[in-house]
Structure formats: structure tokens, C-alpha cells
Image (spheres, helix red, strand yellow):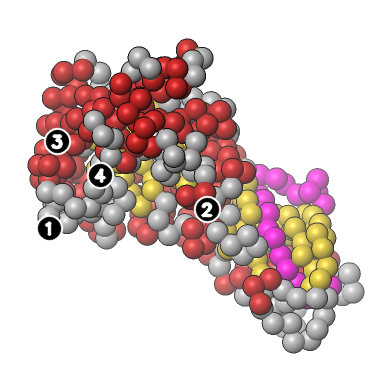
């Protein structure tokens, strides 16, 4: 390092009290000396100026973020994304590991985000290309968060569903039906074997399908389906709205018979979700609008696994996420990173049920199960159930028949020979991804 005065922003991991720091993984592109760029990066997101003029005090031991590791990936002439390099200095692509003292922001999600992906991070001198790749919380920090109230095991207990995936379905058309017709579709899907019939992320408290009427009718339909099938069911109502309505809409929907609630996590805000989780009497399920604009660019923004961890931190019992295949523009590696963020140990926080979704039907269930490598996931077809040629009941039956084939080790086409609903699904949807 050219300027020894910046050495205070570097540390040996063994010399730090690990419980006092969160650990961050960043991708950086910087011009000039990469060590100086990393030191500036730490300064900008923590102390900025670390001395008062005319004093010998040094704020870095208490407040400074520290570089724990810096890996040079490549050196080239230009930044990504056409960002200019007016000085013509070599551009270094780096992976940087940083320890940031969580005492700087405390157990407050808005303050955490302001530090690790705020102004100091994305406007650091000489580093115009930044992506937050991962975040790791010490147990001492996690003890301040309640996390999921129900989690994977609590959802399974509600449904009496063990040793298999949880079968969701997105009621279609997703936004265009009056409440009575909409509720009948949910009812039929429950009769066919769905565990959870859900509102889509776009269906809020609308004039043509008001939440009060929709939740009342679907609550009644859920109870009828439970009586007829002898198995518990869940109606997942979308209460995404302005923050000051969340408690009111929670109480309304739950009183009417919704026994889980969908919230678009980032549009509403994670702090609002944390507030709602403390009040909630039913599981909270996250949907992923407003995450792709932050995460999709390979070298800029925030990796989606960070959002999955933050959603679990905020109290979501289940996280719906982009799934496998070209439809969702998400690599298998990224999907699995998000699944792991939901299921891997995270202090004493309960696991969140991961739900990778996108254009699923009975024929994609085996691929998803094989890739995830566990039964602890949710399977969430839309048209694969509600666009089935035999209706939602037949669509739901085709999903359950596909799982029976997987459990019995029978090829899907072979199983379909004696199961009409599965055969119809293969005929209707067999050209879609598998």
C-alpha cells in the first residue's frame, strides 16, 4: 500500500472480535491501486473522516470497516457497463471481504442497509462498479431478531404435510376475476390436492376483487375443502399495500379465514415486514417484485441471496423466489444460493420454506426436486394447475400424481398411462421446460 495511513482499514480476521462484526463479500471494479480503493471503500461505508482536525484521536478501532481479504480477479482497460475511465488507469476487478462493526447501525434493517449498500458503498471514489455478493451475520447480531414465527416446520404442522414438498398454486387469471369466481377456482384446486391456493403478487385490495370479500369467500371455500378432503388447507391472501394499512389488512384477512399472508417484500419494505411479523398470527410468505432490478446485473447491485437472508431476518416464514429455467433469467447456481439462504443454519432463527417458481407444472417437479436435493421446498405452478384442460382440480391432481411417481421411482410417462390428469398435463404442457 502506498499510503501507510490507510493501513487502519485492514485487519487480520483472527485479531478481530468476530461477534462484533458482520462479514460482507463484494465484487469491486476500481482504477489505480486496488488496496487503496478497498481502504477508501471501507472508510466511505463506516467512519468516512476518521479524525477531527487538530487531534490525535482515531475512530477506526471502534467504527471502522476493515478489509479482511482482497482477491484480484483480472486487470483490464475498461470498466463494465460502458462506465468511463477518463484517466486511463488499469481497471482491477476484485473480490473483497470486509468486516463491518454492527454497532455502527444496530439491529435495525434500514440502518444496516444504509451502511452496507448505501451512499458510501455505491459512491466510493474510484470504484464505480460494485456488487454486494453475500452477507454473514454473527450469532450475537442475530439474537436481536425474532426471524420466522412458523418457518418450515410450522407450515408443515399447520398442513399435517411431512416428508414431501408443499404444493402451492397461483389462482389464475391472476388479477381479472370477481371474488366469487376466484374463490371457486381455489376451492377446486384444494379438492384436487393443493395445500396452498394463493393470490398472485399483483392482486391487492382491488375494486373488482376486494380483499374483504375475497378473503371471506376463500376462507369459506377453504373450510369446505378441508371438510371434504379431511386435510388442512391454506388460503394465502395478498395484503401488499401501504405500510399504514398492513395491520388492518392482516386482521381483516385472518378474521375472514385467510391462514397465511403474502407480502411483496421489497415494495413494502423489510422493516414494515418485521413490524407485521411481530403482530402476525399466521405465516408470512414473501414474493419477489423489485428484487431483479437490484440483482440481475452480474457485476453490479446486490446478489439475490442477500435479499433471501434479509427476508428471513425480517420474519418471513417462506420466500417465493425466481426458480429454475430460462423463464426466470436466473442461473441454477443463484437459485440454489437462495434456497440455501432459507435453509442453512442462521443463528437460532427458524428456516424459511424456499419456493422456487416460474412456469412449473407436473413435468417440472422431478427436475426441481433433484436440483434442490431436499423435500423442504414449495412447488408453485400457476397455469400448470389453473390452465389444466381438466380444470384446477385436475391440475392439482396431476401435481400430486407426479409426486407419487417420483416417490415410487416410476417414470412420469409410465405413471401417466394409468392417471388421466397427469396424461392430460403432459399433453397440454409437455413442450414447456422440464
Picture disc at residue 207:
1
Disc 2 vs disc 3: Cβ atoms closer than 8 Å? no
* Residue under label 3: 184
| Disc number for residue 329 | 2
* Distance from the alpha carbon under mark 4 to that under mark 1: 18 Å
Q: Which x, y percent locates residue 272?
A: 35, 54
Looking at the picture, how far across and down is residue 37, in whole percent?
A: 77, 71
182 w.r.t. 226: above or below: below
Q: Which residues are magenta?
A: 10-33
Residues at marks 4 and 2, CA–CA distance in whole angstroms: 22 Å
Please identify, in this view, whether the residue under mark 4 or under mark 1 is nearer the observer: 4
Is disc 2 surrounded by few (<14), some (14 to 19) or many (20+) residues within 10 Å?
Answer: few
**In whole angstroms, how far apart are the C-alphas of marks 1 and 3?**
19 Å
Of marks 3 and 4, which one's residue comes earlier in the chain?
4
The answer to if 14 sits in the magenta stretch is: yes
Mark 1 surroundings: few (<14), some (14-19) or many (≥20) residues within 10 A: few
10 Å neighbourhood of mark 3: few (<14), some, or many (≥20)? some
Local SS, label 4:
loop
Amino acid at each position: 500500500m502506498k499510503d501507510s495511513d490507510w493501513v487502519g482499514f485492514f485487519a487480520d480476521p483472527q485479531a478481530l472480535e468476530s461477534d462484533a462484526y458482520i462479514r460482507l463479500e463484494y465484487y469491486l471494479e476500481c482504477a489505480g491501486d486496488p488496496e487503496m480503493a478497498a481502504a477508501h471503500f471501507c472508510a466511505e461505508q463506516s467512519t468516512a473522516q476518521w479524525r477531527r482536525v487538530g487531534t490525535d484521536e482515531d475512530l477506526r478501532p471502534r467504527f471502522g470497516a476493515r478489509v479482511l481479504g482482497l482477491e484480484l480477479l483480472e486487470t483490464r482497460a475498461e470498466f463494465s457497463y460502458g462506465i468511463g475511465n477518463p484517466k486511463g488507469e488499469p481497471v482491477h476487478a476484485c473480490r473483497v471481504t470486509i468486516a463491518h462493526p454492527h454497532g455502527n447501525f444496530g439491529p435495525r434493517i434500514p440502518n444496516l442497509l444504509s451502511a452496507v449498500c448505501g451512499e458510501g458503498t455505491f459512491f466510493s471514489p474510484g470504484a464505480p462498479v460494485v456488487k454486494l455478493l453475500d452477507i454473514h451475520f454473527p450469532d450475537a447480531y442475530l439474537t436481536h431478531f425474532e426471524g420466522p414465527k412458523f418457518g418450515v416446520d410450522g407450515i408443515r404442522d399447520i398442513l399435517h404435510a411431512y416428508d414431501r414438498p408443499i404444493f402451492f398454486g397461483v389462482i389464475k387469471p391472476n388479477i381479472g376475476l370477481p371474488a366469487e369466481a376466484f374463490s371457486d377456482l381455489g376451492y377446486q384446486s384444494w379438492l384436487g390436492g393443493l395445500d396452498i391456493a394463493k393470490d398472485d403478487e399483483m392482486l391487492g385490495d382491488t375494486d373488482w376483487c376486494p380483499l374483504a370479500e375475497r378473503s371471506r369467500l376463500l376462507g369459506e371455500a377453504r373450510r369446505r375443502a378441508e371438510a371434504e378432503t379431511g386435510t388442512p388447507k391454506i388460503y394465502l391472501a395478498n395484503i401488499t399495500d401501504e405500510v399504514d394499512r398492513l395491520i388492518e389488512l392482516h386482521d381483516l384477512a385472518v378474521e375472514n379465514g385467510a391462514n397465511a399472508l403474502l407480502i411483496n417484500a421489497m415494495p413494502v419494505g423489510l422493516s414494515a415486514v418485521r413490524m407485521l411479523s411481530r403482530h402476525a398470527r399466521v405465516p408470512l410468505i414473501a414474493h419477489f417484485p423489485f428484487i431483479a432490478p437490484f440483482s440481475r446485473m452480474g457485476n453490479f447491485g446486490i446478489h439475490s441471496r442477500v435479499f433471501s437472508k434479509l427476508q428471513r431476518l425480517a420474519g418471513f416464514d417462506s420466500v417465493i423466489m425466481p426458480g429454475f429455467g430460462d423463464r426466470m433469467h436466473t442461473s441454477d447456481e443463484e437459485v440454489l444460493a437462495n434456497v440455501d439462504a432459507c435453509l442453512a443454519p442462521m443463528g437460532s432463527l427458524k428456516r424459511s420454506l424456499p419456493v422456487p417458481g416460474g412456469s412449473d407444472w407436473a413435468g417440472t417437479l422431478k427436475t426441481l426436486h433433484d436440483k434442490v436435493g431436499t423435500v423442504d421446498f414449495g412447488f408453485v405452478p400457476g397455469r400448470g394447475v389453473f390452465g389444466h384442460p381438466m380444470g384446477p382440480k385436475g391440475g392439482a391432481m396431476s401435481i400430486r400424481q407426479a409426486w407419487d411417481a417420483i416417490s415410487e421411482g416410476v417414470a412420469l410417462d409410465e405413471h401417466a398411462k394409468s392417471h388421466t390428469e397427469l396424461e392430460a398435463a403432459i399433453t397440454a404442457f409437455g413442450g414447456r421446460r422440464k
